[in-house]
Amino acid sequence: MENGYTITPMAHGVKNKTKYWGEEMSFHEMLKKTRQASPYSQYQIGPLVGVGQSAWSKYENGTAAIPDDIAIKAMELLKNPRLKIAYETEKQSGLLNMPFLNNVDDNEVVVLDAVIEEAQELIVNAMALKKIIRNKKSRDDFTLSEWECLVKCEEQIADLFPALKLHFVVMAEKFELDLERISLILKAKFKRKKYIL
């Protein structure tokens, strides 16, 4: 336990699970629960995402891998931000494939406090990292203690990602924050600044 919460580490070759409905679930388990909580039956959702009921049932039961395009259509249709996090976690995709904070009170203010705490640590460690890497050209330029300090700083900086994931999920769930819209605005902003092509 660090900073009052725990994170689920990513294990290579192990299906990663996200906590939802008070229990750990894989993507297919969460897909089933999310669909059951929606107004869609298996017969209704299948054609809406481009498959039959039989194929959909296999996806929900985990007996067949859900193709990426079908998963994306289902996530768009079901509009559940935790489902997207579970998908990215299981696929080991998304920003640095960071874990999802699953033992934090889902109260939006508590989650924001975790973001603030991690952001403050990011600033402290980014300033320390700036001093460490100044005038360095490659890893060979670091002493062992400098390298260990660099790695520790990077770990502290990376701690912000899981807290941000949970923040955006909670904001989407409680206040209907449109995460896709934010993503599009961010991409447009980065293009204007020529950070991306």
Image (spheres, rainbow, N blue to C red):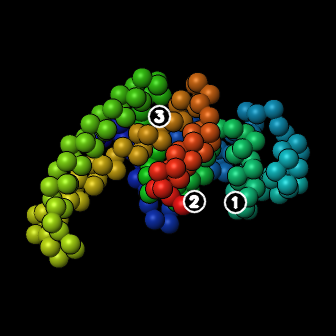
| Cα–Cα gap, marks 2 and 1 | 10 Å
Within 10 Å of the Cα at label 3, are there few (<14), some (14-19), or many (20+) other Cα atoms?
many
Please state if 68 lies on the left or on the right of 197 as rendered: right
| Cα–Cα gap, marks 2 and 3 | 21 Å
Name the residue that disc number 1 marks. Answer: 68
Q: For the residue labelled by badge 2, is the local secondary structure a helix, a strand or a loop? A: helix
Please determine whether, in this image, residue 164 is positioned above or below residue 96. above
| Cα–Cα gap, marks 3 and 1 | 25 Å
Q: Position of residue 186 (x, y in %)?
A: 53, 44
Q: Which circle marks residue 167 in the picture? A: 3
Along the viewing direction, whichever of 16 and 139 lies nearer the viewer: 139
Amino acid type at mark 1: Asp
Give yes or no for contact between labels 2 and 1 (Cβ–Cβ under 8 Å). yes
Please state if 162 lies on the left or on the right of 3 as rendered: right
Give yes or no for contact between labels 2 and 3 (Cβ–Cβ under 8 Å). no
Within 10 Å of the Cα at label 1, are there few (<14), some (14-19), or many (20+) other Cα atoms?
few
Residue at the image position 62 percent from the left and 42 percent from the top? 180
Q: From this viewpoint, is residue 25 visible? A: no
Name the residue that disc number 2 marks. Answer: 91
Disc 2 or disc 3, which is closer to the eye? 3
Q: From this viewpoint, is residue 130 visible? A: yes
Q: Position of residue 74 (x, y in %)?
A: 74, 47
Along the viewing direction, whichever of 180 and 134 lies nearer the viewer: 134
- In the rendered image, the residue lying farthest to the bottom is 140
Please determine whether, in this image, residue 107 is positioned above or below residue 138. above
Amino acid type at mark 3: His
Residue at the image position 46 percent from the left and 25 percent from the top? 108
Residue at the image position 29 percent from the left and 34 percent from the top? 117
